[in-house]
Image (cartoon, helix red, strand yellow):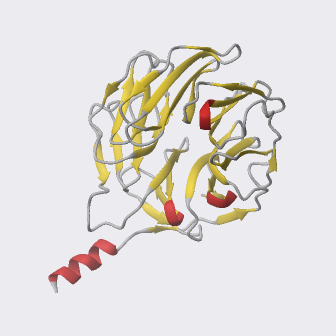
């Protein structure tokens, strides 16, 4: 009887009821990442692992999407990450070092290859500086700093002992990399990296409010919070707790009001207003959700398997 009571209590969950709209998509390829340059202009990317890529564009805040035809100087492989900067620079990275750059808000594109590695993510350190991270299999990872994307000037590749999935730079010098069993921090713009105390999950995504305040989510369902730049991490939710429902997170983002969405496999959606308490979000019909970005404080776009696109209104 005690076991049943405990199990019943553990299964209870709070639910956040937000309108979820499925958007018509021009592709059936998996979509891995989405980013907005403004409240109207946004991009989403993905593809079919070794055989093709897709890059989509919206000019109305995610209500409608069209495909962008990229130059095919190299074999078309899956794109894993897209990031847009307010200055109009947009970059996509992916399989076998693919690197696509637009300087004019996605009107024209240049193609390059940054090594033959799998780049999982890219972030802007400044308007003309970027950082890449990647890896494949659990024990191989790498990162690279690009000092000027307009001339493709790069620093040497830095190798890591684990797969890296997400890279975030809340400032030009302070940055974080998350991956298999660890989260790293740099204080010199990515030239050197040190381990933080985060462990016990495959950390797929992070969201940083500033240099000190961050959230990380893991593939086993862990949610971590730091308020001191990664020196200490508080476990909000443990992926190793057998009493908790199993989630597999792949993305997390925050708006300027401090509201967070985390997404993952089988239609997993979670919402928090305070970084401590999280509620489930329904309406995703079991879709494997991968990428998420806020259009503005009141709307976000979530993308996933099979080209699925959802718009959530807060």
232 left or right, relative to 289: left
Residue 267 % position (x, y): 54, 65
259 left or right, relative to 95: left
Above or below, 212 relative to 290: above
Q: Residue at x 35, y 43 (%)?
A: 225
Q: Residue at x 66, y 16 (%)?
A: 152
Residue 279 % position (x, y): 44, 63
Above or below, 226 relative to 189: below
> Residue furthest toward the bottom?
1
Asked whether residue 272 is in view, the answer is no
Q: Residue at x 22, y 83 (%)?
A: 4
Asked whether residue 157 is in view, the answer is yes
| Image quarter of residue 247 | bottom left
Dividing the image into 4 quarters, which one contains the N terminus? Answer: bottom left
Residue 215 % position (x, y): 41, 43
29 left or right, relative to 226: right
| Image quarter of residue 8 | bottom left
């Amino acid at each position: 009887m005690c076991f049943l009571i405990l199990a019943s209590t553990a299964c209870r969950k709070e639910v956040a009821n937000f309108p979820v709209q499925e958007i018509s998509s021009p592709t059936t390829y998996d979509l891995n990442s989405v980013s907005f340059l403004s409240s109207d202009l946004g991009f989403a990317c993905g593809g079919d692992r070794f055989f093709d890529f897709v890059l989509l564009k919206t000019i109305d805040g995610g209500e409608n999407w069209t495909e962008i035809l990229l130059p095919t100087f190299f074999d078309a492989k899956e794109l894993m990450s897209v990031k847009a900067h307010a200055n109009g620079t947009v970059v996509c990275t992916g399989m076998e070092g693919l690197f696509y750059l637009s300087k004019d808000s996605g009107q024209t594109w240049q193609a390059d290859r940054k090594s033959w590695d799998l780049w999982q993510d890219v972030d802007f350190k400044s308007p003309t500086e970027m950082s890449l991270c990647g890896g494949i299999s659990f024990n191989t990872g790498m990162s690279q700093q690009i000092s000027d994307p307009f001339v493709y000037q790069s620093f040497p590749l830095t190798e890591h002992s684990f797969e890296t999935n997400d890279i975030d730079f809340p400032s030009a010098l302070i940055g974080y990399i998350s991956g298999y069993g660890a989260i790293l921090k740099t204080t010199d713009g990515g030239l050197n990296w040190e381990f933080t105390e985060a462990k016990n999950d495959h950390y797929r995504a992070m969201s940083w409010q500033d240099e000190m305040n961050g959230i990380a989510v893991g593939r086993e369902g862990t949610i971590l919070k730091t308020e001191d730049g990664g020196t200490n991490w508080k476990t909000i939710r443990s992926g190793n707790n057998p009493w908790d429902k199993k989630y597999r997170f792949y993305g997390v983002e925050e708006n300027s009001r401090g509201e967070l969405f985390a997404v993952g496999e089988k239609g997993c959606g979670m919402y928090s207003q305070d970084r401590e308490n999280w509620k489930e979000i329904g309406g995703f019909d079991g879709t494997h959700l991968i990428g998420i970005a806020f259009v503005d404080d009141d709307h976000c776009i979530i993308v996933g398997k099979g080209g699925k696109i959802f718009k959530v209104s807060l």
